[in-house]
Amino acid sequence: MRIAILLVLIAISSTTETHITAIKQLREKTRITPFSDYFYGMLELHQSSKLGEVVTIVQSMLDKLIAASGANEAEHSSQQANYEQQISKLENTLETTESELSSVNQQINDLTSDLSSLTQSLSFQGQQLLLLSNQITQLSDNHQEEVRASEEKFNNNSRYLAAVQEVLRFLSDTLLGNTSLIERERAIEAAKQSLGDKHPISLMIQMTSQYDDNTIRRVITKLEGIAQNVQERLDAINTSSNNSEQQYQTLRSQFETTYSNLDKDKQFNQRQATAKDNDLASAKRRQQELQELISTSQELLDQTRIAQDNENTSYTSKRSHISEEISIVQSALDLLSQLPAQ
């Protein structure tokens, strides 16, 4: 634009003292800038014979400056709208992301608390299961010992009863059943050969054989009473064993049911803990992603605001520069319109 002014003004061929005086007065009223100093210097070269051309060119320059000012305003408005849109999007992203991060942080706290509770529950349930297992084992061992003792007691009494019954059979069949001495002696000898000389039954038969029949009958009666008592003891042992077995089975069933239910609860808690642990890992990954997104968005927002401020500064400077040039050209145009045509 300054080159165009120079070319136009150089082409003007004459100058009047009035024109130069007016330009000097205008220069004195205008703030001195490189442009104004340059522009008025060119006008001082004005020659009145081509004033119409100069007016036309200066008017064209003014129109271009006004158009440039409008373009500057339009560009500024467009860029500011773009910056505002970007800033709004970034602010919305930050707000949404920070809100989600807050929820994720709360989720992490809740999951961590739940996992802590589940870990304590699993530890306690494990201790309970171990205790129950030991109690079941101890219960089984005690029951087996009771069964062994009961069987031993039953067998001892059974052998005792069998011995008493054997004595009764010999006393009844051998002694009372054989009235002659020879027959008794044969029966005693048969018993010795069958059982042995030192067998308690052989010894008892031999001793009892010296008694008369009434005495033998009294002995038989006493032995029958003993046999009945032993049989009652055997019946009592059987009853006690059956009751003990029922109690053992009932108690063992209760223990095993409790163990099974507790084990199911523990397995459920273990599945819950595994699921929550996976959720916690996912939440922590999401937390990191959101933190990185917030950092990136904040950085972009800061950069966008800086760019907006820079654009505002550039726009203000450019607007001031264009306005100043418009003012100078407008003043020159006003001056030219006051000059007499030649």
Image (tube, grey):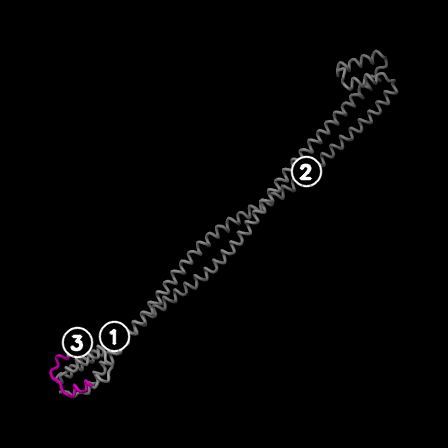
What residue is disc 1 on? 68
- Residues marked 1 and 3 touching at CB (< 8 Å): no
Q: Start and end of the magenta stretch?
A: 9-24
Give the answer, above or below, for where 264 lies relative to 55. Answer: above
**SS at badge 1:** helix
**SS at badge 3:** helix
Crowd tier of the residue under label 3, counting other residues whose Cα lies within 10 Å: few below 14, some 14–19, many 20 or above: few
Q: Which label was assigned to residue 4?
A: 3
- What is the CA distance from the residue labelled 1 to the residue labelled 3? 17 Å
What residue is disc 2 on? 248
- Residues marked 2 and 3 touching at CB (< 8 Å): no
Residue in view at x 84 percent, y 15 percent = 178
- The main secondary structure of the magenta stretch is helix
Classify residue 64 by image quadrant. Answer: bottom left
Magenta span has 269?
no
**SS at badge 2:** helix
Q: Nearer the viewer, residue 260 or 338?
A: 338
Residue in view at x 62 percent, y 39 percent = 134
Crowd tier of the residue under label 2, counting other residues whose Cα lies within 10 Å: few below 14, some 14–19, many 20 or above: some
Q: Mark 2 or mark 3, which has the lower sequence index?
A: 3
